[in-house]
Amino acid sequence: MKIQEIIQEFIPCEVCGNSDISNFYFHVFAHWGSEPFVKCCECEEEYYSKSAKKS
Ligand SMILES: [Zn+2]
């Protein structure tokens, strides 16, 4: 699964309505057991990505 597809699941941001894919950022917290998150760079909300975890 491509990072862009993962991020698209969370667009628009539920908190601030950000719908610009370039304003989102995908990252993995290795110290939390490699949990994948998508972060909105506008409001700094973090979304946990279940589908990224599966792939
Ligand atoms: Zn946001």
Image: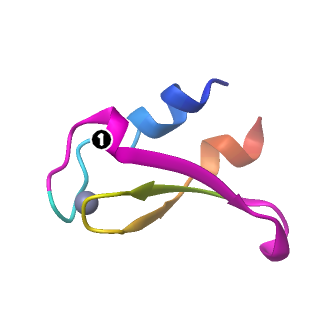
Is residue 33 or residue 30 the one in the foreground?
30
Q: Are there few (<14), some (14-19), or many (20+) residues within 10 Å of tag 1?
A: some
- For the point 36% across and 68% down, which residue is it? 45
Image point (19%, 48%), residue name:
18
Task: Give percent across and percent down for residue 25.
Answer: 48, 48
Q: Quadrant of residue 37?
A: bottom right
Along the horizontal axis of the image, is 47 left or right of 11?
Answer: right
Which image quarter is the N terminus in? top right
Q: Which residues are magenta?
A: 17-35
In this rendering, position of residue 35 left or right of residue 5: right
| Disc 1 element | loop
* Res 54 quadrant in image: top right
What residue sits 32% from the left and 44% below the top? 23
The residue that disc 1 covers is 11
Residue 42 lies, with reference to residue 52, above or below; the image says below
Q: Is residue 7 magenta?
A: no
